[in-house]
Amino acid sequence: MELICPAGTPAALHDAVAVGADAIYCGFNDETNARNFPGLNFSREEMRESIAHAHRYGVNVLVAINTFARAGNVELWQRAVDDAVEAEADALILADVGVMDYCAKTHPQQRLHVSVQAAAANADSIRFYVDSFNAKRVVLPRVLSVQEIAAITREVQCETEVFIFGGLCVMEEGRCSLSSYATGKSPNMDGVCSPAGSIQYREENGALVSRLGDFTINKFAKGEAAAYPTLCKGRYQTDEGCGYLFEDPASLDATTMLPELRAAGVAALKIEGRQRGRAYIERVVKTFKEVLSALDDGRPLPVDALRGLSEGQSNTTGAYKKTWR
């Protein structure tokens, strides 16, 4: 299975290459990618230089152009496609059918992957992307059990890719409007969920209070691990008491599920975290290289090695082990 690693900056890409990533995904520094945060991402020149560097070491680079183009104003997304192709990207990760159509018609030889933002969660929807745009791979949403992933992989004529580590939201990829409601900025169109400019922390009577826009998201006791304030992982007061209404602040860690994911026929494993620092990239990639080496050799898998990097220092296998429908 191919290990796909994040890079939010050229320096992070160099680190991922150095520690053995099979492929790296990244995006331009504009609203065409779903991690459009200040100080991150790549200029056109940086993208060209970074792809050339990765190719010298046999590492592929996948360019994420995975927000949804604005109706009547698609030039920015089309230009991103043209520039990524010109930079010799190994694949483009796309979510918008209009952008996919442009890419397939204008650059028919360019390898195209379906972004998780497209939320293609069944074989019928994936066939649409394969038949219409010659998609070679789909990144599956984080709503599927391993059994469902195996069934889909058997049915479709393209590769499947799944997330194995990193931030985990309420899994409404491409459809979530919570952050837009609180900040006016859309994850799906502006590329920002819970932007840092809308975050506030302050101390109140010995507690740490976090806010997103005008909303109080959480209050942490002294010494309690504090997660980044997003609406989907907020702790709220209700008539039933105080608690996490949508989802606990935890990170996905599917290390223990790797044997099942390999048996399911998954082609690629993705690490979330383009907004993370270089030390995070280096440690996570190194750890999963060791895990995959142990898996290939039949040795016990080193587990729980990354808890300290997890949100709230808590991990989950998410929907991979789900028993509900």
Image: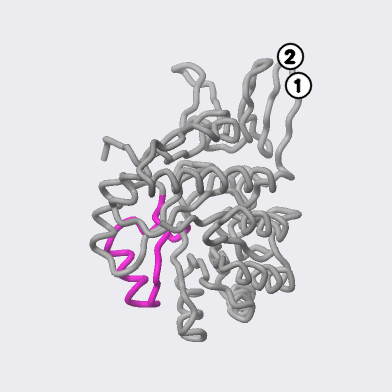
Outermost residue, top side: 205
Q: Quadrant of the rendered structure where residue 81 is?
A: bottom right
Residue in view at x 23 percent, y 63 percent: 155
Q: Is residue 294 above or below residue 115?
A: above
Question: How far across and how far down the image is residue 40, in percent?
Answer: 71, 56
Residue in view at x 53 percent, y 65 percent: 68
Image marks 2 and 1: residues in contact by CB distance under 8 Å: yes
Question: How far across and how far down the image is residue 1, in percent?
Answer: 41, 56
Question: How far across and how far down the image is residue 157, in percent?
Answer: 29, 69
* 16 in the magenta segment: no
Q: Which residue is mark 2?
A: 206
Left or right of residue 119, residue 103 in this image: right
Q: How many marks?
A: 2
* 130 in the magenta segment: yes
Q: Residues within 10 Å of mark 1 (few under 14, many from 20)?
A: few
Q: SS for tag 1?
A: strand
Question: How far across and how far down the image is residue 231, in percent?
Answer: 56, 37
Image coloring type: one colour
Does residue 73 show up?
Answer: no
Residue in view at x 45 percent, y 58 percent: 2
Q: Is residue 287 above or below residue 155?
A: above
Q: SS for tag 2?
A: loop
Q: Which residue is mark 1?
A: 203
Q: Amino acid at mark 2?
A: Gly
Q: Nearer the viewer, residue 106 or 97?
A: 106
Q: Quadrant of the rendered structure where residue 265 is?
A: bottom left
Does residue 55 show up?
Answer: yes
Q: Amino acid at mark 1?
A: Glu
Q: Quadrant of the C terminus?
A: top left
Q: For the residues marked 2 and 1, what is the alpha-carbon distance in whole angstroms?
A: 6 Å
Start-end of magenta stretch: 117-141
Residue in view at x 47 percent, y 85 percent: 105
